[in-house]
Every structure is written in structure tokens, then in C-alpha cells.
Image (spheres, helix red, strand yellow):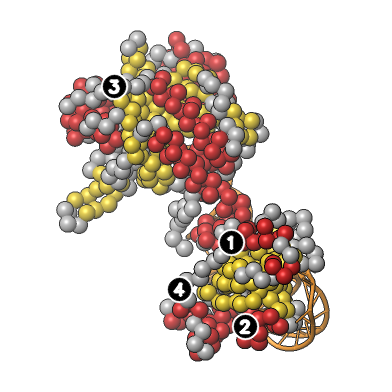
Amino acid sequence: MTDDLHTHGDDLRDLRIAKLTELRAQGNDPFAVERYDRSHIATQIIDGNASHWTLPDEERTALVFSTAGRLTAHRSKGKAGFADLRDESGRVQIYVRKDDVGEAAYEIYKSLDLSDFVGVVGYPFMTHTGEPSLHVKEITLLAKSLRTVPFGKQDDEGNTYGALSDVEERYRLRYLDLLSNPQARDVLTKRSKVVSSMRRFLDGQGFLEVETPTLQLVAGGAAARPFLTHHNALDHDFKLRISLELYLKRLIIGGYEKVYEIGRVYRNEGVSTRHNPEFTLMELYQAYTDLDGIMELVEAMYESICRDVNGVPSFVDATTQETIDFSQRPWRRLPMLEGIRQYAGIAPEELTTLEAGKAACERIGVKFSLEREKTLGGLIEKLHEVYTQPNLIQPTFITDFPTETSPLAKKRQDNSALTRRFEVYVAAQELGNAFSEINDPIDQRERFEGQMAQREDGDEEAHPMDEDFIRAMEYGMPPTGGLGIGMDRLAMILTGATSIRDVILFPLMRPE
RNA sequence: GAGAGUAUAGCUCAGUCGGUAGAGCACCUCCCUUUUAAGGAGGUUGUCCCGGGUCCGAGCCCCGGUGCUCUCACCA
């Protein structure tokens, strides 16, 4: 570490360390500063409608404003100079004259480096070129930076030069990305608002937010390989959760009637523009309702979130340029097999056995490999994904998923091959998965056993048996509707992000 | 996991035919008291991703590796 402080060739940093040492020698240790009270933030000072701009000169120059921020530019002109200070709200220009601040303070001003934190006291004034600024009377170094943040520069047309653009650096050094790229910051801020808006909506609907274990003995509720970990004191292996489902249902069994959790889940899978191994899931469960009730909830929730985040209940999809309107209710409902009939040209009657299904696939010349498909349900879902999904631009509920791929959803009374389940699609992306939950412990056990058979058949992601969960269900579970939404995917759609990494502050990266 | 692309100064990027590395910004010195991609004069900078190889000589060619990006696969 000490060696690292004097890395050969890092001149800029060495110079700043030397400056810091000098400041400390003079008794002006910037890191000794603990607090700086601001009367104004940047945008309040430069606000054109603010009352201070209408005051007579003598009153305005008597004002004592204080503000603080990061030095992002300086344009010094000998015995006076301009500099830009940036805080969370925006940028304010400051003007420092040797005459006004005195020799010592002017020396401090001159010694400031880009990225330093600075506090200033002064009065608001308008420059000859019409830029609202702060005329500085006192200046204080609040914290020294040893490295320059690549803020970039902007010309009159708004073109930016020198901003951090290396994609890897933007993800690894996200704090620099946030400072350097306003768009990146906007997207990530919006993501945060999507989450808080959903929370607000659900709270308003009377749902109780809960937290359930991330360390689990059986990682269930979804089809995915888990991360493994170990508890030392118990000397026992645990898995990181892959979904929220089974513990939330235990709470429904326990008497809560409307619960939800927004939490991180972990799936030991590859990384891509749509997959990060840890991501945020929202799941909710509501007693005494079914998937039709959940559909209405989803319609209202997405409209509410979109309105919160965009101001209107619609947005323009980044890839198709189509305007997607959540307020056009009810949204389209389309049974999965009907969708396949419509978009793939295979009738439901042809999808009654795996063999017949594969024959139909060969007839139409499907563009995916049939060898991997081991169950009829899997084949049906594949047809849906390849042929139907790309056409689902406006909000659409796809219903009646195959029982084989839905081990936690109630079967249809009139057709046990299909379940009371839906997925909602927006802009051709899945944005929610819901069903009338199984509450029959006998049925649930049989489904798990079916999954175990698939697991023994080599499907590592088939659902594991969960005896503890079945025991809970045997005590009695009310009819319940449940919903799961990938928050990152939702944020992607609403922000127009093309990579999931753009909506995750610190995406998983290989070690440097 | 496969293919393609990419890696050069603190940041953004050039680098021709293989001849010993450059620009803008940043930084340093000087001038400049309403500038704004401030300006003017001068100056500094590097593990050319890593390891081998070919060659008198490699940022460049060859082999191997690594990170990242994209596409595909995987992933309800």
C-alpha cells in the first residue's frame, strides 16, 4: 500500500499527495473538516425565478449564501477566476477575485485541483454573459481528491468530450460513471424510482412488506442452479435463494393475507445483457384471489409505476419505437396454445403428445433444435418463446401454461395438462409471472415428485423436493394468487436500457 | 460454452510498409480581475493488457493467455 502511494509514473497523483502534505504541514488538513452547512444547493442559486435576482444591487450583494460541491472546471484569469462547483442538484459557477477574498484565500483557490470538494460563501450575481453565478467572499477546501474524475467537457451544442466511455471502467468504477455520464445516472436513478413506486403502490393496496431468508436449505420456487455456501458454527451447507416464493407462501399459511417482498435472488447462471447472477425480484401473494385478480392488480400497478416514473401511463419502447400504453385496459389475454396457433401455425390438437408436437414442428420447419426438448410442456413453451413472444409488443397476458413446466401452479379444472398461470409481456419481454397457487398438499407433493424425476433425468434445474414446505401446506393454505416480477427487466424496459448492467449499480464482473 | 471485436498517457483517441510512440483534454511554469470546450507562450507524461516466438529491430507479424463488449448458446 505504501509502495502503491508512490507508483512510478503516477505524477498527477504524486503532485496531489505533495499538496496535501503541504496543506497539513500548514495546519490546513482538509480531511479535518467534518461539516459544512449550506444555505443553498447549486440549482437554488442559479434558479432564474429565485427572489434574489430581483433584489436591488445593494441588497443582493449583501446576501450571504453558502454552498458546497465538487470542483469540475476552473477558468482562472490571473488575479481572478471562474470555477464550476457541482453538487447532486447540478452545477453552479463561482467567481473568485483576489481583491475580495484576500491573498491567502486566493492562494487556496489557485491550489485547488479538479475533483476537490470546496465550500464557498458569497452573493449571487449575473455575469456579463448572463450566467447566474456566486461571487465568492470565502472559500474552504472540504476534501482533497488524489485522482481526477473524468468529468468531460461540453461544448455549446452539448457534445461531450473526454467523458468516461470505456464500458468496462464504467461498470467497475461506477462512481466515475455516475459523475461522468449524466444519462447513466438518470437511468440508475429511474431504476430506484421504479422500485420505490412499486413499493408505494403495494403499500397503498394494503400489502405488508416482509423479509425472508436468503440462506436456505432447499432453494426452490424457480428453476435455476443455486449458489452454495457454508455456515461454520452449524457446520452445514446452505444455498442462496433463487426465488422468494416458498417462504412468502408460508406466511400466507401463517395468516397474513397480502404480503410482498422486493429482494435479491441469486442464480448460478451465465452472464449476458439480460442476466446478472444476482438480481432483484418482487413477489407478492394475496389470499382469496386467483390469477384473474392478479391480472387486474398488474394492470393497475404498471400504469401507476409508469405514471410515477414517466409522468404519463405510456412510454416509447426503445427497440420498436412503438408507444406502449398501460392505461388501455383490459390488456389483451391470449392462451399460450392460441398464440402458437396464431404465430407458429400449429394447432392445439397437434400438441397433445411430445411425438405429435415434434412432427408438427418438423412440418413447419422450426428454427430450433428439437433434440433438446424432452417434454411436451417444454416444447410448447419453446414454441411460445420463439414464435409468439416477439409479437407481444402491447401489454399481453399469456395464459394456460403447461403443467409440466409449472410445478407450483394450480391445474385447470377442465384440462389437467394446463395450469392457471400467466406471464405478462410488454415490448416482447416477459415482465411478470403469476398463478393461482397450488394449495393442495397432495398435488404439490406429486408435482415435486414429477420434478424429481426430471432431475434424475439430468435436468439440474428441476424443482427440488421441499418437505418442510409441504408440511406447512398440510396445515391448510387458503386459495391464493401470486406474482413475480424481475425488477431489473422492468427497469430496463422503462428506461430503454439495452443491457441489464445499465440498471444495476454494480453488476457482477470477473476479478480484475 | 462458441464466434467476432477490442485493449496505446489520468480521460478520449490516432499510430501508414516492422525502424524505437503521438494529438486534444488534464497536469507543470509564466502572462491575463466577468470567463465558459476561457485564451496566449513554453513544458512534462507510457509495463503500448500479460507471456512466449520470429526478426538486426515488434505497439504493429506469429503462438498462447487474460479482461471487457457484442452475437449466439445457456437462462421460464
**What's the residue type where badge 4 is placed?**
Glu
Q: Earlier in the sequence, mark 1 or mark 4?
A: 4
Q: Is residue A115 above or below residue A226?
A: below
Q: Which residue is mark 4?
A: A34
Q: Nearer the viewer, residue A387 or A215?
A: A215
**What's the residue type where badge 1 is placed?**
Ile
Q: Residue B63: percent from the left, percent from the top?
A: 54, 60
- Helix, strand or loop at mark 1: loop
Residue drawn where x is 59% and y is 39% of the image: A310
Distance between mark 3 and mark 2 Cα atoms: 72 Å
Q: Is residue A229 above or below residue A383?
A: below
Q: Which mark is residue A479?
A: 3
Please tell me if label 1 and label 4 are on a single chain: yes
Residue drawn where x is 60% and y is 77% of the image: A139
- Helix, strand or loop at mark 2: helix
Tell which tag, 1 or 3, sits nearer the viewer: 1
